[in-house]
Image (tube, grey):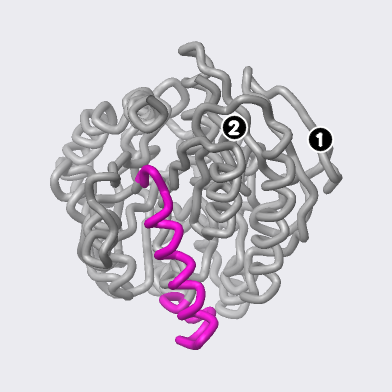
Amino acid sequence: MHILFLTDNFPPEGNAPATRTYEHAIRWVQTGHKVTVITCAPNFPEGKVFDGYKNCLYRKQKMDGIDVIRVKTYITANEGFVKRILDYMSFMVTGFIAGLFQKKPDVIVATSPQFFCACAGWMLSVFKRKPFVFELRDIWPASITAVGAMKESSAIRMLEKLELFLYKKADSIISVTHSFKKELIERGVDGEKIDVVLNGVDLTKYEPVEQKDVELADKYNLQDKFVAGYIGTHGMAHGLENIVSVAEKLQKKDNIRIVFAGGGAARQKVVDLVKAKNLKNVVLIDRQPKEMMPRLWSLCDISLVPLKNSDLFKTVIPSKIFECMGMGIPTLMSVPEGEATNIINNTNSGLTVESENVDQIVDGILKLRSDQLLFNELRESSIDAANQFSRDLMAHEMITIFKKVSD
């Protein structure tokens, strides 16, 4: 089978969409399928092209057996509605054109969170007369208004009409959460064509560690410290100013450190707040290559997973929880009660507290620091739970769906 996959995030970018696509694609290649990925020059989240790459018209490379086509786009940082729309639309155009030259695909897949990528996938499916699979990673544009990036308007309503059009035109929809599937059915989309394939973890890369990475622990003075880490994209949805407030309340606890590692639209806000509050118990680490992630995670005793208190985020499952499971790192989750909190509670892989509740987050950190029996229990449960979310299983589920729609 030849899988033609459109995504505007792909390694060396290290965010969740890039990681999911890559880790699935290498498994499809290993099982004998041909995979062509159309993407752009790596630039997420700062909007700066990574070293060694250029924003050129068309570039083809091989990456672990995957044919990767990179096309020219309008590049901007992951902030600002108008500029981001121009970014998305430029990829829709150039990705579609590049897709026209790919020979004999059996199925065309396009992934969100934004759905202009899906527009290109649908158009290619029409031109090539092949089935179109929409991988749904986010309910967009609802997430735009949820983080306050844009208010309800005629533009948002037009985007919502386009969103529903794509759902109905897709031959298959692969949702990353059960909540997304439920919402689409309530909005009139045929539930028979919606499958759920959760995010997962590559257990060959993320495995339990018994000690912090020595080099990094020395570099950031984290030896013998209890580390609560926020690792990943610093987005508007995460409410990271609350985690800075947590650090402020804990600054007299010399044995506890709060680590922020990553980049994104909210990164500078975090840096400025830490500086303004003169917090000595916070460690700021810039965005690192994806291959560094296991070493970064090893610094953490617990993982902080926050989201703003919006009903939309009841349906979101932060993918980092699966990496934490693989490494045996308990999660302290402060998101609206929903599918993600159910996973943490049902697997006993962490603690859940109210979204944006600084005092409860502080209490959770102190509890996990002082109660060794509870910490060990959550760590062991996390390791056990990881097998349920193996990337091998998820990749196999997706291939089964592709075969079903292409037969």
Relative horizontal placement of residue 155, taking residue 61 as reference (left or right) = left
Q: Earlier in the sequence, mark 2 or mark 1?
A: 1
Magenta: predominant secondary structure element?
A: helix
Q: Residue at x 24, y 70 (%)?
A: 354
What amino acid type is highlighted by mark number 2? Glu
Q: Nearer the viewer, mark 2 or mark 1?
A: 1
Q: According to the image, label 1 marks what residue?
A: 59
Q: CA distance from mark 2 to mark 1?
A: 23 Å
Q: Nearer the viewer, residue 356 or 244?
A: 356
> Pointer 1: residues within 10 angstroms few (<14), some, or many (20+)?
some
Disc 2 marks which residue? 291
> Dot 2 lies on which element?
helix
Whether 248 is drawn above or below 380: the answer is: below
Could you tell me residue 255's position as x and y percent?
A: 40, 54
Inspect this view and state whether residue 115 appears: yes
Q: Which residues are magenta?
A: 145-174
